[in-house]
């Protein structure tokens, strides 16, 4: 006779002492490492208050934080010895306030003739494909509404009960936390808006990503993935979409960050505003144990005048496994033209800052035009900058700020006869300092850090260094079928949406409308699709890139600020130039990266 197995679900508390820090120092004082250990025998109670459908934290008591079950919670149960089915998704119903245990009955699993059964369970419900090992993901971008309530679907938990007698048939599931959590609080000294909280490890230990929970007969162990593209040493807590949360002077905020259940030698917490400011504090020589809850009180925040700008190192605050295609990236059209001079040179000069000076303001995309001599030109005008010089400026900056990475698009700016296809790849490689990367699907920020991705609009011999661009139409206003690819005919390609209307818009106002329409369209862009939306415009013989930028740039700034969200790559003229609103446009593009969450691999 087959009987349904009756489950008594128990879970432990994630234990920690809440430690306050009221110091206004930039570095947080050491936190005492005196947290109690997790005991797998401690039960939690159940709660159905307010018709919640996820588990919730209870109040701290005796340094223990209980985790309450709620109606609608789902767990996965796995038993290789069971008959009928070996896995079942169980929904908890009938939970009552402060229950110490709750019984749930399976509907598809039944006892078999095996003398002993081994049970493994996970919350939230997930796939358990093999006994004793459960796969989880702790997301590197987590969202919160700004309330004190944590997102309990991130409170991963596991349970095991091995060698259950076929005659006894009593199954208890003592759930153990498969996560760590930071309980972050701070107080505003003046009115401030926070859009994102970033938690990072001091030594590069992953705080998020794929991991497994494995049971060895007496305890659970947790191991992170070896795939560096599927983990991150940085986590972003996204608050309320674009608006973030605005605190009045004296107001206190509280947020939770769920981390991988591993040991950390030290952690840092940074608070970011929607207009590019950051303040943060670090622990010093503190070991954070695995699968625990820690309270970190940042104290009263300093005045806004003491906050730092993020623009020079904005990629530092983006998780490693975010897709580069889902970033908002400021770029420069004809990036090397700041020193162009000569007759009618105003038509060829598109920038007022050198490449070396564009990098500190946050530009990470560069349009470069080498000719056959590998010096950079705009049409027939020499910039006085060599390809090697441009690369050297980027590498020098990334040597000082290794969290940053750069993308360049190149095209042959000379007669084809002077462009020797056989020399291009060797020359690019020679000047790449071993830090050039190939185009690939789902390229991540972590893979781009400290590197340069070169994409060429012209093909050449010996295979690409970086990758090629396909189907880039001249004067395109709204093109959705271009692509980046590794090799001709290769499956390693991703779609590129393109706007590069540089002369057909008739005037700068019309061009601004074209740019703004693509900004709006970018909101519907799939995360693995790239977008390049040129704000640059040559215009008529009576205008210049500078005069056009004075009309286009402020219009695009206003449109982005009123329609925030991902905007893709925006190459512009006169980036950083206050007279042409190029400083505001660079900032507006960068700001989107903390106002909205990005897609991750």
Image (cartoon, rainbow, N blue to C red):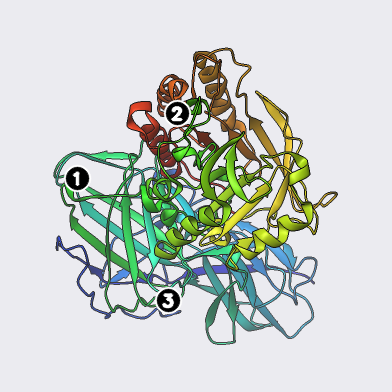
Residue 336 drawn above or below residue 507:
below
- Dot 2: element: helix
Residue at the (26%, 75%) spot, across then down = 284
Q: Secondary structure at mark 3?
A: loop
Q: Nearer the viewer, residue 596 or 99?
A: 596
Residue 568 visible: no
Identify which residue, 18 or 230, lies in the foreground.
230
Instruction: Give the quarter of the image for residue 171.
Output: bottom right
Marked residue nearer the N-terminal end (3 or 2): 3
User: Local crowd at mark 3 within 10 Å, few (<14), some, or many (≥20)?
Assistant: many
Q: Is residue 467 visible?
A: yes
Q: CA distance from mark 1 to mark 3?
A: 35 Å
**x then y, percent, for residue 463:** 78, 57
**Between marks 1 and 2, how big is the CA–CA gap?**
24 Å
The residue tagged 1 is 304
Label 2 crowd bin: few (<14), some (14–19), many (20+), radius 10 Å:
many
Q: x%, y% of residue 156?
A: 51, 64
The circle drawn on residue 560 is 2
Instruction: Name the N-terminal-most of marks 1 and 2.
Output: 1
Where 127 falls versus 343 (above or below)?
below
| Residue found at the very far right of the displayed protein | 489
Identify the residue at horizontal 42%, vertical 49% (top origin). 359
Residue pointed to by mark 3: 290
Residue 317 coordinates in the image, percent (x, y): 41, 54
The location of residue 198, given as percent across then percent down, is 38, 56
């Amino acid at each position: 006779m087959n009987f349904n197995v009756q489950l008594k679900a128990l879970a432990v508390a994630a234990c920690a002492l809440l430690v306050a820090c009221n110091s206004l120092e930039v570095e947080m004082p050491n936190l005492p490492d005196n947290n109690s250990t997790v005991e797998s025998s401690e039960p939690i109670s159940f709660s159905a208050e307010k018709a919640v459908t996820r588990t919730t934290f209870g109040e701290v008591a005796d340094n223990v934080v209980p985790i309450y079950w709620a109606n609608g919670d789902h767990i996965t149960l796995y038993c290789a010895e069971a008959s009928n089915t070996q896995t079942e998704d169980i929904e908890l119903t009938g939970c009552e306030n402060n229950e110490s245990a709750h019984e749930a009955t399976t509907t598809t699993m039944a006892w078999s003739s095996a003398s002993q059964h081994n049970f493994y369970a996970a919350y939230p419900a997930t796939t358990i494909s093999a006994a004793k090992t459960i796969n989880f993901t702790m997301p590197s971008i987590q969202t919160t509404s700004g309330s004190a309530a944590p997102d309990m679907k991130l409170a991963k938990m596991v349970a095991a009960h091995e060698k259950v007698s076929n005659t006894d048939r009593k199954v208890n599931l003592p759930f153990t936390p498969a996560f760590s959590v930071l309980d972050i609080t701070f107080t505003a000294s003046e009115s401030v808006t926070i859009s994102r909280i970033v938690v990072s490890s001091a030594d590069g230990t992953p705080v998020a990503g794929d991991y497994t929970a494995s049971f060895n007969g007496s305890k659970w162990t947790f191991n992170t993935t070896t795939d560096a593209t599927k983990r991150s040493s940085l986590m972003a807590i996204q608050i309320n979409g674009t608006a973030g949360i605005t605190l009045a002077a004296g107001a206190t905020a509280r947020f939770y960050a769920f981390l991988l259940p591993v040991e950390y030698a030290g952690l840092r917490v940074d608070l970011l505003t929607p207009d590019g400011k950051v303040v943060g504090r670090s622990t010093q020589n503190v070991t954070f144990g695995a699968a625990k809850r820690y309270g970190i009180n940042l104290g009263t925040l300093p005045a806004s005048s003491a906050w730092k700008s993020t623009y020079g190192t904005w990629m530092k605050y983006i998780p490693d496994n975010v897709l580069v295609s889902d970033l908002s990236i400021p770029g420069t059209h004809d990036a090397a033209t700041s020193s162009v001079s000569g007759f009618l040179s105003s038509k060829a000069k598109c920038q007022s800052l050198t490449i070396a000076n564009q990098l500190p303001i946050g530009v990470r995309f560069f349009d470069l035009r080498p000719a056959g001599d590998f010096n950079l030109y705009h049409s027939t005008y020499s910039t006085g900058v060599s390809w090697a010089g441009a690369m050297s400026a980027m590498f020098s900056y990334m040597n000082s700020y290794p969290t940053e990475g750069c993308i360049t698009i190149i095209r042959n700016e000379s007669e084809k006869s002077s462009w020797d296809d056989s020399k291009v790849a060797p020359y690019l490689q020679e000047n790449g300092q071993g830090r050039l990367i190939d185009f690939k699907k789902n390229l991540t920020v972590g893979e781009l850090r400290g590197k340069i991705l070169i994409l060429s609009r012209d093909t050449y011999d010996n295979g690409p260094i970086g990758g090629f661009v396909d189907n880039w139409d001249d004067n395109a206003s709204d093109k959705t079928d271009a692509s980046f690819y590794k090799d001709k005919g290769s499956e390693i390609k991703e779609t590129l949406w393109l706007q590069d209307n540089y002369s057909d818009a008739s005037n700068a106002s019309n061009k601004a409308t074209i740019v703004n329409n693509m900004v709006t369209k970018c909101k519907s862009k799939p995360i693995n699709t790239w977008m390049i939306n040129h704000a640059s415009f040559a215009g008529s013989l009576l205008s210049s890139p500078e005069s056009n930028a004075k009309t286009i740039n402020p219009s695009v700034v206003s449109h982005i600020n009123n329609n925030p969200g991902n905007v893709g790559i925006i190459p512009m003229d006169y980036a950083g130039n206050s007279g042409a609103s190029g400083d505001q446009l660079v900032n507006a593009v960068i700001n989107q990266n903390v106002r909205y969450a990005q897609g991750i691999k």
